[in-house]
Image: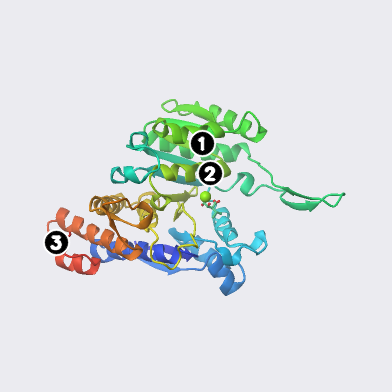
Amino acid sequence: MTKKIAVLPGDGIGPEIVAEAVKVLECLKRDYGFSFEIEEGLIGGAAIDETGGPLPESTLKLSKDADAIILGAVGGYKWESLDISIRPEKGLLGLRSELSLFSNLRPAILYPQLAAASTLKPEVVSGLDLMIVRELTGGIYFGQPRGVRTLDNGEKQGYNTLIYKESEIERIGRSAFEIAQKRNRKLCSVDKANVLECTELWRETMTELSKEYPDVELSHMYVDNAAMQLVRAPKQFDVMVTTNMFGDILSDCAAMLTGSIGMLPSASLNAQNQGMYEPIHGSAPDIAGKGIANPIATILSVSMMLRYSLDEPGLADNIDKAVNDVLDKNLRTADIYTEGSKKVATEEMGDAIVAAMKKNMWDSAGGIGNPEECARSGGMSNDEY
Ligand code: IPM
Ligand code: MG
């Protein structure tokens, strides 16, 4: 059946990296017979400029009707002075909330080829493979009341509300326990239960839920300690589950363990496994338009989409292998460049990954593809692949 994929490039480097992800999808269509239709939509600042708001009705409809969504990034200097309620980020948050994408999976995997690109010692990070499960539609990001008010003495006061219902904690807990069951069956729940009542409830609910998953070893950790442990000894973790804001912060921290935030994909799933797939990095306005952004996080997001929403694990494996292959070939975008490797631009990295996918297919299927044609359209010489 033809799958419908909504593609929302967004702002900053978003359009550049999404273009490379689309090349990968087109390769899957042309060479692997994967049948899909793409429809593009506006989101974030690009949508504000065209329509006045960050999440137009048409984008919401397109996203709701799609089997899966690929998103680039939102935000930029241009829109920073707008009221917070209509900023580009609200488009992304609105989409997460409207589609009930409560379960955000953020894998942090260190490719061995990038051990030297991490700011941490290779022995601390080598072999790292952890999964952060972030609650995505609740907590302080969405809690009411919120705002800035003026007190009687004329002073302004800002306020937000950290709020979770048991049912919200339970459903993200289930996602995390189920993921842990498929991995090394170790789950660390991160909270601040020594200070915040809301996360005391989080801890109690996780503990209660753990009775249904006796095969998973549950532990608890305060978020400040978790941040420290992530840079001290990250390999102690298998799966971490945490609130929306703690997950936002810890996943950026985990990203640096892998060498660059430009390597990390994410999946945001609802109860029906419909998902939005995006790199965890932002729109990087400082390098937008320069053609130097790393497209790998977005390309790996396509792989996650095939695995989690579109039931095509074989195609996902192929993308993952192709990424591995180009890293083996020592190709690096600027963010993961280390001396002695070959620095490539965004497009070159995308082309190299497509070429590696075709080469893999040709190798494994005994000649269904044509390696010369692969190399040509992948932009690589045949010698290199
Ligand atoms: C992320 C981002 C977003 C978030 C921003 C862009 C709203 O930092 O996906 O981690 O805070 O969730
Ligand atoms: Mg973030």
Residue 227: give its label. Answer: 1
Q: Quadrant of residue 256?
A: top left
Marks 1 and 2 sit apart, C-alpha to C-alpha, by 9 Å
| Mark 2 beta carbon near ligand 2 (under 8 Å) | yes
Look at mark 3 in the image and give the residue it sits on.
383
N-terminal of the two: label 1 or label 2? Answer: 1
Marks 3 and 1 sit apart, C-alpha to C-alpha, by 45 Å
- Asked whether residue 258 appears in the rendered view, the answer is yes
Residue 249: give its label. Answer: 2
Q: Secondary structure at mark 2?
A: helix
Residue 48 image offset from top left, x and y in percent: 59, 69
Q: Quadrant of residue 181?
A: top left
Whether tag 1 and tag 2 are in contact, CB under 8 A, the answer is yes
N-terminal of the two: label 3 or label 1? Answer: 1
Residue 73 image offset from top left, x and y in percent: 49, 60
Using a 10 Å C-alpha cutoff, classify the residue at mark 1 as few (fewer than 14 neighbours), some (14 to 19) or many (20 or more).
Answer: some
N-terminal of the two: label 2 or label 3? Answer: 2
Q: Secondary structure at mark 3?
A: loop
Task: Name the amino acid, label 2.
Answer: Ile
| Mark 1 beta carbon near ligand 2 (under 8 Å) | no
Against 329, residue 381 (above or below) is below
Task: Name the amino acid, label 3.
Answer: Asp
